[in-house]
Amino acid sequence: MKKVNQCLILAAGNGTRIRSVSAGLPKPLVDFRGTPILEHVIRRASQAGIEKFVIVVGYRSDLIRNWFDGRSLGVSVTFVENSEYHKSNGISALQAKDKIHENFLLLMADHIFEPETAQALLEQRLQPGEVILAVDPNIDRIFDLDDATKVRRDGDRIVDIGKEIARYDALDTGMFLCSPSLFGRLEAATKDGDCSLSDGMRQLASQRRLRAMEIGEAQWQDVDTPQALAYAEGVFDGFIHHERHVGSLARV
């Protein structure tokens, strides 16, 4: 099995729900424990084995590009512009279809996670035309259930996905292992020039090509509101201190 070493990060949204604490910055650059959220995402994916990143930017993309100038994160980064960032996230993903030709990890720029979860996902065997979604079965611990994307499973297959579905048994963590065929699914799901990732995932689910990988007790958090950001800081407090300690030792 060929190693997956490329990651697509969706970072184009305008972050209206977190604007009260963003000071005009795009959401990926909002501070999380002293470091922009986007840097946390990149570093954790890198720890899991990712070497190349394609980042779709949109709202105030100049600030994100300028932030990367002169920084060395030890990875290759390619930016893709999405001028229609006011649309759903499936449109952002489609902007990268000409940049990605092999299996890839798909992440959100506002989801904090443990590197071990990404590593476990990358170790899954992906069948042709399939997508594997990391799911959290611990529904009771979710911070904002109303905003979470829910999934319903039949065995290890996801049969329904969406924020409004009535029956569900796990939550979408925003971490996907994909083949490039995902882009064709998103194109097929596009209506009136718009489409969400969930629209494409429902197409895959209808053909039993959307598989679930449980994350167990691993932590993750969508940080799209000030309240969620504060909650995530508490959840990941110990992990962040460990990261800094390890980083300090590495520089000695």
Image: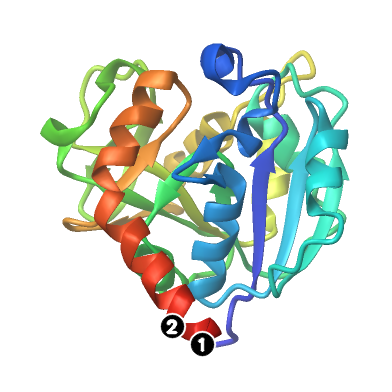
Q: Quadrant of residue 53?
A: bottom right
Q: Which image quadrant is residue 245 in?
A: bottom left
82 relative position to 238: left or right: right
Pick whichever, 95 or 200, lies toward us: 95
Residue 41 vs residue 172, the one in the foreground: 41
In-image side of 61 versus 13 (left or right):
right
Q: Which residue does the image show at 67% across and 54% down from the upper left? A: 8
Which residue does the image show at 64% across and 30% down from the upper left? 89
Element on which disc 2 rests? helix
Query: In the image, is residue 43 above or below residue 35?
Result: below
Crowdedness of circle 2 by 10 Å Cα count: few (<14), some, many (20+)?
Answer: few
Please tell me which residue lies in front, 199 or 174: 174
Query: Of helix, strand and loop, which one carries label 1?
Result: loop
Q: Is residue 33 above or below residue 69?
A: above
Dividing the picture into quadrants, the one containing residue 229 is top left
As drawn, the label of residue 252 is 1
Residue 106 point in image, percent of width and height = 58, 53
**Which labelled disc corresponds to residue 197?**
none
Numbered circle sitting on residue 249 = 2
10 sits left or right of 142 in the view: right
How many marks can you see? Answer: 2
Amino acid type, mark 2 = Leu
Percent position (x, y) of residue 90?
66, 33
Q: Are marks 2 and 1 in contact (CB under 8 Å)?
A: yes
Q: In this view of the protein, can residue 84 be seen by the observer?
A: yes
